Image (tube, grey):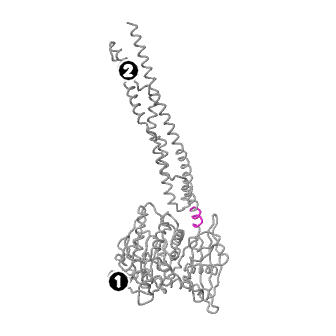
Amino acid sequence: MAKPKIDSVKRLAGLILAIEDKRGPLDEIRQLVEQLQRGGIMTVSGEAVIVKRLADRHTVAMELLRSLGETSNNGIEDALGQLEEVLNAVEWSAAGTIRDELKRKAQSQADILRPYLDRLAKWRALIDGVQQLLGEGLKAHAPVFTEQRDVQRYEASISIAERALREQQYLLLIQSLNQLPEGFEVVETIRARLQEKIKRTEQFSRQADLLLLQSPLDTQLRRFHYTMLMRTASEPGSHGINIQDSSTLVEQDRVAMREVIQQVTDAIDRGLAREFAVRRGGSAAPAMAASDATTTPPDDSEATTTPAADVPRRFDVEEEEGLGGNPLQLNTLLQNMGDLMFRLFMPDWTQRYLQDTPCALMITTNDLELPWELMYCNGNYLCLERPISRMPMGRALPRLKPKSAVMDGRKLRFLLIYSDPENTLPSAGTEINTLNRHLNDEWKDRIEVIMLDRQQVTGARLNEELRLGSFDVIHYAGHASFDNKSPELSGLLVADREGRKEVFFAQKIRRLLEGRPLVFLNACQSGRTANEEAPLRTDYLLEPAEGLASAFLYGGALACIGSLWPIYDKPAAEFAVEFYRRALEGYMLGEAMRLARIETRTKYPEQITWAAFALYGDATFRLAH
């Protein structure tokens, strides 16, 4: 009886060793299958089925082994036989082959992954470098909104890929990397943009102040004398310096510049006459009746009730008789005038300073008849070369308020006003609808837009809106009344309670305005564009327009943009859209204006819409950070 027991023990020991021998290869191929399944690149469905069978066989073998302790002596041999049958199943003979195939697939997976891992490492290094540069941009208060958004999007894909790598989810890793651009040029482009924005911000956050005072005409010598005071922009570690100089112009030079402005005005008048003629469906006429010019304003952003809004204006000024008879482009006329202004008004040291020093420029002057922004140097207009603004010469201290308006997690509030009490300016309604559509399409997650149409714009309503001070931006398109003798009595034209025309005076604006809004005024003289009794006249609106802008600035507005002549058309609306886009991206207001000018001039090279606006206030202020 001893020998059969010894044989059974030996047989059992051999089976135990066999179970352990199979455990190692089984665990290895099971891990390979799990890794390849988790990776998602290679197909291992067939191998997974066989591994499942082997795992089941091994589980059965372990259960049979555990059950031997409860088996009677007579049943031991049968139990051992069952265990041998499980361990000798044909599937075990395929384990080695499966392991080799799985290792081959694992190697193939590694080969497929290698370029993706290299790409992931390069993306991480590049994005880390850009993130560091982005931090420098934020520290410098550069307008890096677009780059920050792009980097965040790329960072999200890279982080998902890195997490997938840690978790060995290689298909997800590949899918995440495929969300990124194929090459790395986009990162280099972002880097270059950031470097340029940081450079521009550092340059343009420095501002020079130019005070230009015109003395009364010397009637005996027939000349004008200008005293110039300039504070240069501060350099790092030092303060700007104050310099005084002067320029003297003969009356004829000053008159010649004013005549150029008159030619600009005449060209705009002819363009407006053609526009009203096109609107009525006839040929160009010198004037139009108010009733003929009146159309129903658009009710929604898709409506177009003014065909002339899409008709490009090409203002040409005919040369004087004997000068060739060819049409002289208005842009060329402005350039010639700007070059003459720069040479005659700016002393030599000022010319050198402006030519050599990239900085913002604020101009304060009592000569409001000339467009100082259009001075021409370095082969370009000042307003296209640098941020430039005007500071009105007021008669009262501005109301003290915080220096800047900054987005603090809340939405910025826009008030869009279409004011047309006599229903003669539907293009202004088109402008407001265009702005409303673009602002909501592009920035609805960051701003809130309230729009007042012509039926809602009354003096009482503006009293309340200005006094509450709940808006960060006020954009006005409509009529205005300009008083050259008393700028304080200039104002916006609105309706009273009975629907009659009412002047919302500049002095009233200054006293009522609360908050620190950015104000954009695109307002033209009432009646000048639709009155058959008088010729179409726009005049040059610098002096009265500055009076209206002063009311907002001295009431505490962040800044005010005013139109120098009335232009209600597609380019003017697009100019405003581009300006707001840049301002909301974090550009300084002067730089947002400069870029909007460049964009509009590039898109409409034969028009002068880009030159039609002036920024009043500090060009270095921001609407949003």
| Lateral position of residue 567 relative to residue 336, left or right | left
Q: Label 1 vs label 2: CA separation?
A: 106 Å
Residue 505 locus on image (x, y percent): 43, 81
- Secondary structure of residue under mark 2: helix
| Lateral position of residue 390 relative to residue 300, left or right | right
Mark 2, residue position: 85
Residue 314 locus on image (x, y percent): 50, 79
* Residue type, label 2: Glu
Who's the residue at 57% across and 52% down the image?
A: 129
Mark 1, residue position: 500
- Secondary structure of residue under mark 1: loop
Q: If the image is split into quadrants, where does the N terminus sit?
A: top left
* Residue type, label 1: Arg
Please rate how many residues cluster around mark 2, counting C-alpha atoms within 10 Å: few if below 14, some from 14 to 19, many from 20.
few
Look at the image and give the residue range highlighted in magenta: 197-205
In the image, residue 50 above or below residue 18: below
